[in-house]
Amino acid sequence: GDSVTQMEGPVTLSEEAFLTINCTYTATGYPSLFWYVQYPGEGLQLLLKATKADDKGSNKGFEATYRKETTSFHLEKGSVQVSDSAVYFCALQTDSWGKLQFGAGTQVVVTP
Amino acid sequence: EPEVTQTPSHQVTQMGQEVILRCVPISNHLYFYWYRQILGQKVEFLVSFYNNEISEKSEIFDDQFSVERPDGSNFTLKIRSTKLEDSAMYFCASSDRDRVRKEQFFGPGTRLTVL
């Protein structure tokens, strides 16, 4: 069945470091791909998305490119801040308005 | 900005009791979802709801679970007889019909603790 695999955390970084969180997926057809972020004590917020191959989603300095050939959607940010400390979830959706299927989540800790 | 709200933020109940978790989706949204996250595990889909009926449900969503949209604004998840393993954070989400956005907006969650 469809699934999402993302790198385990926690990932600990210093402020201004480069962040990469790997995400790969298995799906039939052409899913939409998402990154959600969960700040401490809060719900899930959409960070960025891509709906077709080679699309690049971007928001708040984060980017991810939908790579069909490698079935990947890796999240990157060039210079992290302490405020980026959160849990990041990669997710896919195979049907419009259908369920989201999430990866296990990656905790990111950014230290000053 | 409109947001999804959930009540209560934390519910403690005894095993075997019924609980109702409440959600108020964003007002013009038509698609509604429940997910749960057991501590330390991934977010799991429970059920989706559209046009006053269940669109899809997961294996987790057995006969002990039910959903309802009683009054056009609230969207509820009922667990009839709670088990210890139902302890989790439950998230409600909603989405509108916009084919471009298709974003699911999540509420802050209800932490359910079954003792």
Image: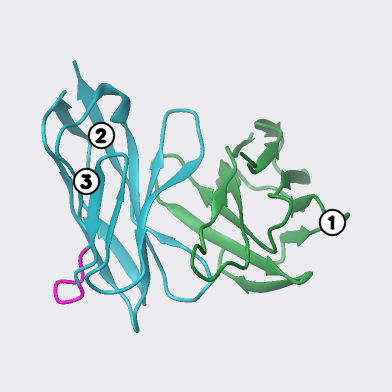
Question: Which residue is located at x 57 percent, y 42 percent?
Answer: B87
Q: Main secondary structure of the magenta part?
A: loop
Give the numbered dot on residue B53. none
Which residue lies most toward the bottom here?
A: A29
At label 1, which amino acid type do we have? Gly
* Residue at image location 18% in from the left, 53% down from the top: A22
Q: Residues within 10 Å of mark 2 (few under 14, many from 20)?
A: many
Q: Name the residue located 11 percent from the left edge and 37 percent from the top edge.
A: A18
Colour cyan belongs to chain: A
Specify the chain shown as green.
B
Q: Position of residue B103 (x, y in %)?
A: 51, 58
Give the mark nearer the N terminus: 3 vs 2. 3
* Image-quadrant location for residue B114: top right
Q: Is residue B61 visible?
A: no
Q: Is residue B87 left or right of residue B21?
A: left
- Image spot of residue B20 (x, y percent): 77, 45
Q: What label does residue A8 carry, if any? A: 3
- Disc 2: which chain? A
Q: Which stretch is magenta?
A: A68-72
**Looking at the rendering, which quadrant does residue B33 occupy?**
bottom right
Q: Is the residue at mark 3 from the same chain as the one at mark 2?
A: yes
Which residue lies under the disc numbered 2?
A: A108
On-image quarter of the N terminus of chain A = bottom left
Q: Is residue A89 above or below residue B53?
A: above
Q: Residue furthest right?
A: B71
Q: Is residue A71 magenta?
A: yes
- Type of amino acid under label 2: Val
Circle 1 or circle 2, nearest the eye:
1
**Category of crowding for the residue at label 1, using alpha-carbon neighbours closer than 10 angstroms: few (below 14), some (14–19), many (at least 20):** few
Q: Nearer the viewer, mark 3 or mark 2?
A: 2
